[in-house]
Structures are given as structure tokens and as C-alpha cells.
């Protein structure tokens, strides 16, 4: 506490099988994104087993990793796959996901300037040890506010739940990119309120006419920096994104620029 400097001396990264158990409902996704840069820049085969929370507020959900983040990495040359064994919600945790990666030790530059036409839009309400009407009410709001037909909405219940939990996930699949928006049920918060929040976020993204959402923009910075370059269009950057850019400059010799294109 109170330190003014950081000394960072990484050792050799060794491919192989690793098991990380958070021990709580802490985010498996954040653990993955912590070790992922080292994996991507090291040639070899990696197998990760992560246990903890797979659907967490303030962190990418499993669905966001699988449908949005990892497909972009694959376009950059990463050979990586992800599997969900069981979901885990706060506070019980108990989730488990597995990652397999065969890395060439490098990434290729990628430009994400266009988003392409919408191929598919869908909403999934995931329930664990909670009444079905919660998810049904969330999906009703999504249908009404976004104008999606019933066939584009789906209710899923966890087969072998570890604890209670609820997530409403919106998928907007385009030719160039898939964006994912997730809202989480909270004790004392109405299902309609949960749905309204995530729908509002998705609508802001759709109205902006950009390919990359605000949270995905933050997650793409490290892969783009390791690839030696790239550019993408996104919404106004969050403080998390601008802080990430400044910290990257301390570790890597990069020149990252953010410029406003319109209002």
C-alpha cells in the first residue's frame, strides 16, 4: 500500500493442462482473460479447467466469451474453443468451463470497421432454481421493446443447479460480428426492471451504428496490442477502456489513439 512503482518480471510460459478453482462465485471469464495473453503468445497446446462463476455481473458471461469475444480471436489466428460444463451464479458459484487452445504464438492484425447486416437476433432467459415466470416476464419485455417475434426468444432452465440465479442474454448476430448483452436477476429487483436495463443497452448499441459494443471494446485492447495493430469503431469509450489504454502503454511499445467520429 502506497507503493509508487511496479516491478514485473515474467518467467517462461509452459504449455499444458491447468486447473484454476476460484473457490467462490468469482468470475471464470476474468481468470481466463488474465492468462489468455500469455497463452496466445506462447506456441503449444493448452487445456484450462476453470471453476467458479460463469455468469457474473460486471464481467463477461460465458455466452459473451463464446459468441462474441473468442470468434474475434479466431479471426486473428487463435485456435481456441470453449465448453460450459455447468453454469455458476453469484453467490453459490459452482460453475465450470473448459478451454482448449493450440497456439501458434502470434496473432494477426484485425480491422473491425463495419458490422454488416443483421443475420439473427435472439433472447435467452436462463434460470437456476427459480420460477419460470421470471424468465417469461423478461422475455416478454424483450419482445415488446425490441419487436422480436416469439420464435426468437427462449427459456432455459439449468438441469443440475448448484444455486439460484437468472440471466437474460440478448444476441445480435451480424455478418462481421456478434454482440452479446446480459442482465442478471437480483434479489428485490423485478424481472421487468432487469430486462429493461439490458434492452436499453442493446438499443444504444443498435442506434450507434458501430460493430463493437462498449464492453467488448475494452476486452479487445490487449489482443489488438499483442497483434501489433488494428482498429475498430465503437461507442464512446468507458473509463475502464481509457484506463486500460493508458496502462497498456506502460507495458508495451504501442501508440493507441482514440478519436471521435461523430456526435
Image: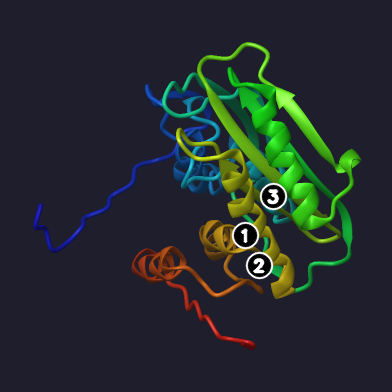
Please report contact status of discs 2 and 3: CB closer than 8 Å, yes or no.
Answer: no
Please tell me whether mark 2 sits on a helix, a strand or a loop.
helix
Which residue is more in the foreground, 40 or 213?
A: 213
Label at residue 19: none
Q: Position of residue 86 (x, y in %)?
A: 61, 20
Q: Earlier in the sequence, mark 2 or mark 3?
A: 3
Residue under label 3, please give it. 68
Please tell me whether mark 3 sits on a helix, a strand or a loop.
helix
- Residue 82 appears in view: no
Q: For label 1, count other residues whose C-alpha is less than 10 Å away and answer few (under 14), some (14-19) or many (20+).
A: some
Q: Residue at x 46, y 47 (%)?
A: 58
Q: Position of residue 145 (x, y in %)?
A: 75, 56
* 67 displayed left or right of 246: right
- Residue 121 appears in view: yes
Please report contact status of discs 1 and 2: CB closer than 8 Å, yes or no.
Answer: yes
Q: Residue at x 55, y 34 (%)?
A: 55
Q: Residue at x 10, y 52 (%)?
A: 1
Q: Position of residue 28 (x, y in %)?
A: 49, 33
Which residue is more in the foreground, 249 or 237?
A: 237
Which residue is more in the foreground, 56 or 200?
A: 200
Label at residue 201: 1
Q: Residue at x 70, y 37 (%)?
A: 137
Q: Earlier in the sequence, mark 3 or mark 1?
A: 3
Which residue is more in the foreground, 235 or 196?
A: 196
Please, is residue 251 above or below residue 162 in the view?
A: below
Please tell me whether mark 1 sits on a helix, a strand or a loop.
helix
Residue under label 2, please give it. 204
* 223 displayed left or right of 251: right
Please report contact status of discs 3 and 1: CB closer than 8 Å, yes or no.
Answer: no
Amino acid at each position: 500500500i502506497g507503493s509508487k512503482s511496479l516491478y514485473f518480471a515474467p518467467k517462461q510460459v509452459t504449455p499444458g493442462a491447468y486447473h484454476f478453482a476460484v473457490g467462490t462465485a468469482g468470475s471464470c471469464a476474468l481468470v481466463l482473460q488474465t492468462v489468455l495473453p500469455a497463452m496466445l503468445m506462447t506456441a503449444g497446446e493448452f487445456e484450462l479447467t476453470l471453476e467458479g462463476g460463469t455468469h457474473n455481473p460486471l464481467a463477461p458471461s460465458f455466452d459473451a466469451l463464446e459468441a462474441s469475444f473468442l470468434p474475434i480471436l479466431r479471426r486473428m489466428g487463435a485456435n481456441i474453443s470453449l465448453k460450459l460444463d455447468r453454469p455458476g451464479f453469484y453467490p453459490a458459484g459452482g460453475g465450470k468451463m473448459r478451454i482448449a487452445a493450440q497456439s501458434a504464438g502470434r496473432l494477426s492484425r484485425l480491422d473491425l470497421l463495419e458490422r454488416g447486416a443483421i443475420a439473427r437476433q435472439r433472447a435467452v432467459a436462463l434460470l437456476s432454481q427459480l420460477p419460470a415466470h421470471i424468465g417469461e416476464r423478461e422475455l416478454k419485455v424483450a419482445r415488446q421493446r425490441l419487436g422480436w417475434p416469439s420464435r426468437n426468444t427462449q427459456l432455459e432452465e439449468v438441469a443440475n443447479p448448484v444455486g439460484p440465479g437468472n440471466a437474460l442474454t440478448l444476441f445480435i448476430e451480424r455478418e462481421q460480428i456478434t454482440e452479446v448483452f446480459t442482465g442478471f436477476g437480483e434479489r428485490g429487483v423485478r424481472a421487468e426492471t432487469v430486462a429493461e436495463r439490458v434492452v436499453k443497452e442493446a438499443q444504444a448499441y443498435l442506434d450507434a451504428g458501430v460493430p463493437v459494443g462498449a464492453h467488448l471494446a475494452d476486452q479487445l485492447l490487449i489482443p489488438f496490442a499483442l497483434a501489433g495493430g488494428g482498429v475498430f469503431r465503437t461507442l464512446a469509450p468507458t473509463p475502464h477502456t481509457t484506463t486500460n489504454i493508458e496502462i497498456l502503454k506502460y507495458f508495451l511499445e504501442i501508440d493507441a489513439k482514440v478519436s471521435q467520429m461523430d456526435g
